[in-house]
Amino acid sequence: MAKKEVPAPRQTTINEQPRLHQRAGEIQAYGTVSHGLPLELEEPVRLEMTEQLNLLLADTMTLRDLYKKSHWQVAGPTFYQLHLLFDKHYGEQVEIVDEIAERIQLLGGVSLAMAADVAETTRIERPPRGREEVPVQISRLLDAHQIIIGHCRQLARRASDLGDDGTNDMVVSGVLRANELQVWFLSEHLVDVPLVHAEEPRARKAG
Ligand SMILES: [Fe+2]
């Protein structure tokens, strides 16, 4: 009868020390999409959509940060209400950022994440580091919204043409409509109406 082999003791690498400072190659390059996802969307469609969504993401992250800058640096008699409003819009943009980034990932792409990459990609004008007056802050925010809204309209139509209904839905319902609403709240602050004394009818500009 053959002698039963006794398995050699398993080499163990268990160690209580954390393995710090590890690096390795990327598992997926930026600008690519993974193959063979069961989404019934062709790879070229997912490639184009993720590229467009990354542009939208970079602009949305920039707008998000512009809101926080405005929240911190606002000055003047309307400080309190604008301080709160800017932070409310910031919070809504944070959620939109996450929605866009995760849509890119679920389409098999790689989403932008870091500030340096966002700065290189965004189409929104870079503001100065210092503080600016309220009308300038609001104008900058409105200009940023306009870039995003214009891109949303074009991207939503393209997504629909390519059969990417999920991207179309997210862009319209999640991004476009939220941006439109924020534009309303901001732009009303740039309407020059009297605060205390109503103007005499004859003082009003004709037309
Ligand atoms: Fe705050």
Image (spheres, helix red, strand yellow):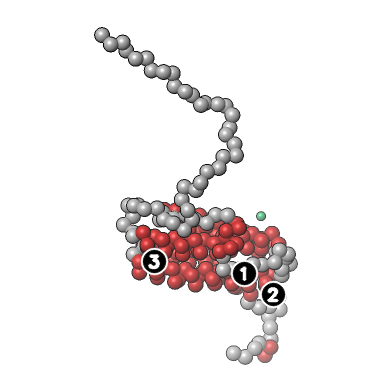
Whole-percent x and y of residue 156? 42, 68
Outermost residue, top side: 1
Residue positioned most to the left:
1
Q: Amino acid at mark 1?
A: Glu
Q: Which residue is mark 2?
A: 195
Q: Kindly identify which residue carries mark 3.
A: 159
Residue 125: image tag:
1
Instruction: Please state which of residues 128 and 68 is positioned toward the viewer in this rendering.
Output: 128
Q: Secondary structure at mark 3?
A: helix
- The spot of residue 109 in percent (x, y) is 44, 55
Residue type at tag 2: Leu
Q: Is residue 177 in view from this perspective?
A: no
Of the image marks 1 and 2, the number of the one nearer the N terminus: 1
Q: CA distance from mark 3 to mark 1?
A: 27 Å
Q: How many neighbours does mark 2 have within 10 angstroms: few (below 14), some (14-19), or many (20 or more)? A: few
How far from the left and from the top, in percent, is residue 163?
34, 64
Q: Residue at x 41, y 55 (%)?
A: 33
How far, Cα to Cα, is label 1 from label 2? 32 Å
